[in-house]
Structure formats: structure tokens, C-alpha cells
Image (spheres, helix red, strand yellow):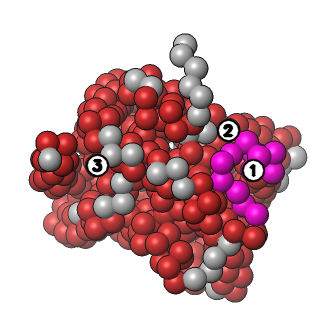
Amino acid sequence: MKKYKTQFDMMTQQTIPSLIVKLGIPTMISMFVTTLYNMADSYFVGQINTSASGATSVVLGLMAILQAMGFMFGHGSGSIISRKLGQKDIESARTFSATGFYSALFAGFTILILGSLFLTPLMLLLGSTDTILPYAKTYAICILCAAPALVSSCVMNNILRYEGQAFFAMIGLTSGGIVNIFLDALFMQKMNMGILGAGLATAISQYLSWFLLLTMFLLKKTQTSLSFKYVRFNISTLGNIVTTGLPSLARQGLASISTMLLNNAAGVYGDAAIAAMGIAGRISMFIFSAALGIGQGFQPVAGFNFGAKKYSRVRQGFFFTLSFGSVMLGIAAIAVYFNAGACIQVFRNDPEVIRIGIPALHAQCIGLFFVPFQVCNNMMFQSIGYKFNATFLSSLRNGLCFIPILLAASWLFGLAGIQVAQAIADVITCLACIPFTVSFFRKISREELS
């Protein structure tokens, strides 16, 4: 394998397929493990009862809020960093890395305090029923305690990825994920701690990931820095991070709202419906992580090469990522479609949960075929700094499309409408991305000729 003198040379000269696979595989592994330990919580909690299983679906909305803040600062700073490094402006890159990290840390502590003060109304708002509430509060308080680590870890993870150091990011995330699964089994099966054990396992693993990711910066494995001397809490720096990260805030924030509305809509049909939709969503997310992982491998490639004005490499990276992601996700979606009942039964062996979950999972597997194109567009536009395009498109799948479809479908078709809402949103979102993609590639083609 050819050796490159600098990170810049590797990002702008290595062949696109090998570069994206090199950066994307560690990210895919990280995404798989992260999703897997979320599923592990669902598996172990599902052994308690259906209401406890529903609690993990409710608290998923809280985790989406935390991830929204983390990804806003992480993708916001990371996208700018990749372009600054592409322009060989390392000093500015360090300013954005340090500012993004400490902003996220402050946001995590703020959510911890406010969430703890208003825990009961927050859980009810996120769709908890009276029978789910005790389990949801116990699980949620553990997640809130991990908020500072979870939010700031998102920043460190994304900075490493956008620098092209996906392997180091993988070490931090996968180590925490493996420990989470081990602690789930220890606390819940050996020590009989119930849902509190699941919450503690998640909190401990988040802090372990945080420490390992921080170590990469302390050991100076990166071009960027988290030293406080680089922090600039001014309108220009913070404003640039926040506006660049708005697509992620919109995507994850709307995911939280969507989870809340989904739980409230499903709650009409009982705790089993909430549990079923949550389980189907987690399985779907596990498949989705294949496309998301390879898409995140494409992000630093897009950012570096757009900053270096190597537009043909951006285009080539987009279509390679789309092809690779479509094949991987398609194979997984087909496999799960034909084994939907068995997949759901793993998490909760309740006939009612399985009955409701199977049609929902079937629909989501079909909708997933339309997801890779969305992911490639979102990742590309955010990485190159096209803030409006990225924010609008990232708002569609979990928000601007899904929310009205969910409300209308549940009103018109009841539970059946709830089960297919996400799949319909996926199809519409995919179609909405087409004009943005065509317009952008025409634009860079003109710039290449000028």
C-alpha cells in the first residue's frame, strides 16, 4: 500500500474507493457496536416485562435530544475542521475543535440539570404511560447523568473522523459499547438490578468512551487540539459551528419529537404497541447504521477535497458511497424482512408485541432501500458547508415528512398507519433529494470547466 507523507496528501490523492472504505469501515463498526449496545439494553430490559421494554422506547427520545446537541457541535466543528485542514489552516482547525468540545460539555451539564429537575413531565412528554413511567424515570436518570460525556464524546468522535482518524474514533466507541453489553449482563442477570442496571451500564460505558476518545487528543494523535487556550466563545466562531451543525440538530431534534409523537400515537393501543414500535425502530436503525457508517466515511473525503477544490473526487466519492451503501443495506434489509418475527421475539417474546411489530418492521425494511441516497446527500452538503441544503434535507426523514405523515396516517388508518409512516417518509425524502443533487453536480461541473 502506498505511503503518503501527510494526512492532506492521503485525503486528496488516495483512490476514492480505498479511501472511503478505509475511513468508512471503522465508522461502520462503531455505528454497529453503538446500535448493538442500545439493542442490548432493549434485550435485557425486555426480560422484565412489556412496560419496562416500553421504557427504553420512551427514553430513546431523551437520547435523541442529547445526540442532537452532540452532533450539532460535533458535525458543525468537524465539517469546518476538514475544510480548514484541506486549506492547510491548522491553527483555525484547532480553534474550532476546542470551542466545539467545551461548548458540548457545557450543553451536556445543562441538560443534566434541567432534565433532572423536570424528570416526570419530561417522560410524560416523551410518550410514557402511567405503567411505563416508573421504569422510564429510573432509566432516564442514569442517561442524564451520562449527558456531559455523551454530548462531548460526539464532538471528539466527529473531530477524529473529519481529520481522517476514523480508527481512533472506533477504538473509543467500540470499547464503550462492548463494556456496556458486558455490564448489562452483569448488573441485570447476575446482580438482578433490573432496569437500573441497564441505565448504569449505559452511563458507565459512556464515560469510558469519553475517556478513551479524550486520550487520543492528550497523546497528540491529532492535528487538532482540545487545549482551552484555543477556545473562542465569540459570535463568529460559535455561530459558524452552530449554523454548520444545524442539519444534525434538525435531524436529531426532530427525531426526538418524532419519537415522542410516535410513542403517544402508539400508546393509544397499549404498552405493547409502544414496545413493538420501539423494537422495530431499533432493528431498523441497526440496518440503517450500515449506510450511515459508510456515509460518515465519505464526510471527511468530501470536506477535504471540496476545500482543496478537487471537485471530481467529491463527485466520485458520492456515487461510490451510494453504491456501496445500497448493496450492504439492501442485503441486510432483505434478510431482516424475511425473519421479522424472529428478530422482534429476541427483544420481547410477547405475542402482542410480535403481532404489532412484524408489519412495522416489514414496512421499514422496504423504506430502507430509499435511505442511502438521503444519507449521501446529507453527508455531502453538511461536509462542504452547504448549510441550507443540508439542514432542509436532514429535516425531512424524521420531521418535515414523517411527522405530518404519522399524524395523518394514524388518524386515517389507526395502528396500520402508524406502522407504515416511517417507510412512506423515507420514499418521499429520497425523491425530495434528487433536484438538490442534480443542481449541485451541475454547478461543480461548470466550475471545473471555468
Residue placed most toward the observer, 384 or 9:
9
Q: How many marks?
A: 3
In the rendered image, residue 206 lying in the magenta stretch gets the answer no
Callout 3: helix, strand or loop? helix
Q: Residue furthest top?
A: 1
Look at mark 1 in the image and give the residue it sits on.
Answer: 217
Give, as a three-letter code, the residue at label 1.
Phe
Residue placed most toward the observer, 276 or 110:
110
Which residue is located at x 67 percent, y 38 percent? Answer: 168
Q: CA distance from mark 3 to mark 1?
A: 30 Å
Which residue is located at x 16 percent, y 66 percent? Answer: 412
Which residue is located at x 66 percent, y 48 percent? Answer: 223
Task: Please tell me how crowded label 2 is: few (under 14), some (14-19), or many (20+) other residues with Cα within 10 Å.
Answer: many
Give, as a three-letter code, the residue at label 2.
Phe
The answer to whether residue 345 shows anywhere in this view is no
Classify residue 197 as left or right of residue 373. Answer: right
